[in-house]
C-alpha cells in the first residue's frame, strides 16, 4: 500500500513541500508516491495560454524525491487521459495502479473529465483515506506556481527564492552568442534551449552557473545588450566569476538566480560599461560568498 500525493508540482515550492512533509509524517512503513502530470494540462487544451515552466520535468522529479517522495509517477497528460471519468481515475490509477491507502491533495484539487471530481467526491471513496491540505499562506496569499512565476518575470528573484526555498533556475545548452563578452574580458556562457521555461525580467543578476560537477558563482545578464548595435534577440548569459579559458559550448548548463542587481542600461561607450560590469561582478562575488 502507498501514500499518494497528487499535483502538477511545478516548482516543488513551499506549498508542495508542505504536502510532501505531511505524507512523510503519515507514512510509517508505507512508500510515498508523488503523482504528477506532463505536459501541463493547459498546454493541451489552450496552448496559447500555457504557463511557462518553473521546473523542467527531470528537475521536478529530482526535487520531489529530495522532498520525501520514494517514487514519482508521471502521467502523460493527453486529451484521452483528460476524458477519463473521475470514477475511472480513482479506480484505475489510484486503486489499481498505485494501491493507495491514503491520498493527499491540496484543497483546490480537481480530477476527471471536465474537472468533475473534487476533494468532496474524493473523500467519498472508502478504499483510502483522503487528506486535504490548505497550502501555506504567506502575506494573506497562497504560495502558488502562478504567484512565483509572476515574481520571476517581474525580476523579483529573491521573493521567488523564498517561496521555492531555493534559487530559480534555467536549464539549457551553452550556445554561441555574440562573443562580445570574450572580446572585452568577460567571456559568458550563452544559454540556449530554454523555450518554455520561466525567464526573469531583463537585467543583471548574481547567482551560479553549473556545468557538470562544476558550480561557479556568476554574474548573469538577460536582455539585448543595448550598448551595442546589431545585437540579435534576447539572450541569457552568465559570466563564471574569475574563471578563464572555459570551453563550455554544446554542454548542458544550469543558471541559478540568487539576486537582482540592476535593470538593463544603455551605456555611452565601452568604458562606462566595463566600469559598471566590474562593479556588478564585485557585488555578485560578495553575495555568492555569503
Image: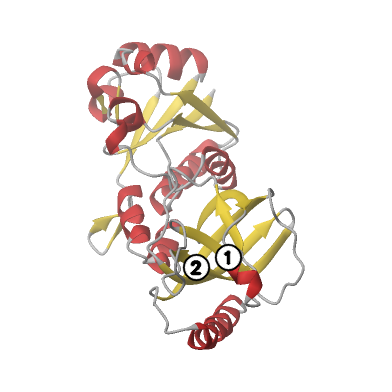
Residue drawn at point x = 56 percent, y = 44 percent: 59
Q: In which quadrant of the rendered view does residue 80 lie?
A: top left
Residue drawn at point x = 59 percent, y = 47 percent: 66
Left or right, 267 with reference to 141: right
Residue drawn at point x = 58 percent, y = 48 percent: 172
Report the quarter where the N terminus lies: top right
The answer to whether any part of residue 139 appears in the image is yes
Query: Does residue 113 lie above or below 16 as drawn?
Result: above
Q: In which quadrant of the rendered view does residue 40 lie?
A: top left
Q: Residues within 10 Å of mark 2 (few under 14, many from 20)?
A: many
Pick the front one: 141 or 192:
192
Q: Position of residue 93 (x, y in %)?
A: 44, 17
Left or right, 195 with reference to 138: right
**Outermost residue toward the right?**
245
Query: Does residue 211 lie above or below 132 as drawn?
Result: below
Q: Position of residue 125 (x, y in %)?
A: 32, 18
Residue drawn at point x = 45 percent, y = 32 percent: 36
Pick the front one: 236 or 205:
236
Q: Position of residue 87 (x, y in %)?
A: 31, 12
The answer to whether any part of residue 166 appears in the image is no
Question: What number is the disc on residue 221?
Answer: 2
> What residue is pinned by disc 1?
238
Left or right, 285 with reference to 21: right
Q: Residues within 10 Å of mark 1 (few under 14, many from 20)?
A: many
Question: Are discs 1 and 2 less than 8 Å apart at CB?
Answer: yes
Report the quarter where the C terminus lies: bottom right
Q: Which secondary structure, mark 1? A: strand
Amino acid at each position: 500500500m502507498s501514500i499518494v500525493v497528487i499535483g502538477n508540482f511545478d516548482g516543488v515550492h513551499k506549498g508542495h513541500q508542505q504536502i510532501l512533509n505531511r505524507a512523510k509524517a503519515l507514512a510509517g512503513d508505507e512508500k510515498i508516491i508523488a503523482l504528477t502530470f506532463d505536459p501541463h494540462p493547459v498546454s493541451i487544451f489552450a496552448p496559447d495560454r500555457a504557463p511557462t515552466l518553473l521546473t523542467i520535468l527531470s528537475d521536478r522529479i529530482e526535487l520531489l524525491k529530495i522532498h520525501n517522495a520514494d517514487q514519482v509517477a508521471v502521467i502523460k497528460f493527453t486529451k484521452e487521459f483528460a476524458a477519463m471519468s473521475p470514477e475511472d481515475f480513482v479506480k484505475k490509477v489510484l486503486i489499481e495502479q498505485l494501491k493507495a491507502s491514503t491520498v493527499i491533495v491540496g484543497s483546490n484539487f480537481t480530477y476527471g473529465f471536465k474537472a468533475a471530481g473534487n476533494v468532496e467526491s474524493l473523500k467519498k471513496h472508502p478504499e483510502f483515506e483522503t487528506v486535504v491540505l490548505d497550502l501555506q499562506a504567506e502575506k494573506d496569499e497562497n504560495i502558488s506556481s502562478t504567484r512565483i512565476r509572476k515574481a520571476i518575470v517581474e525580476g523579483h528573484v529573491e521573493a521567488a527564492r523564498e517561496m521555492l526555498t531555493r534559487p530559480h533556475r534555467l536549464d539549457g545548452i551553452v550556445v554561441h552568442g555574440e562573443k562580445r563578452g570574450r572580446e572585452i574580458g568577460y567571456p559568458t556562457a550563452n544559454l540556449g534551449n530554454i523555450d518554455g521555461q520561466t525567464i526573469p525580467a531583463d537585467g543583471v543578476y548574481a547567482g551560479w552557473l553549473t556545468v557538470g560537477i562544476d558550480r561557479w558563482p556568476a554574474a548573469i545578464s538577460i536582455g539585448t545588450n543595448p550598448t551595442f548595435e546589431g545585437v540579435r534577440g534576447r539572450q541569457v548569459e552568465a559570466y563564471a566569476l574569475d574563471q578563464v579559458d572555459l570551453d563550455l559550448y554544446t554542454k548542458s548548463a544550469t543558471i541559478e538566480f540568487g539576486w537582482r542587481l540592476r535593470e538593463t542600461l544603455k551605456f555611452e561607450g565601452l568604458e562606462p560599461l566595463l566600469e559598471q560590469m566590474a562593479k556588478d561582478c564585485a557585488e555578485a562575488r560578495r553575495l555568492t560568498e555569503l
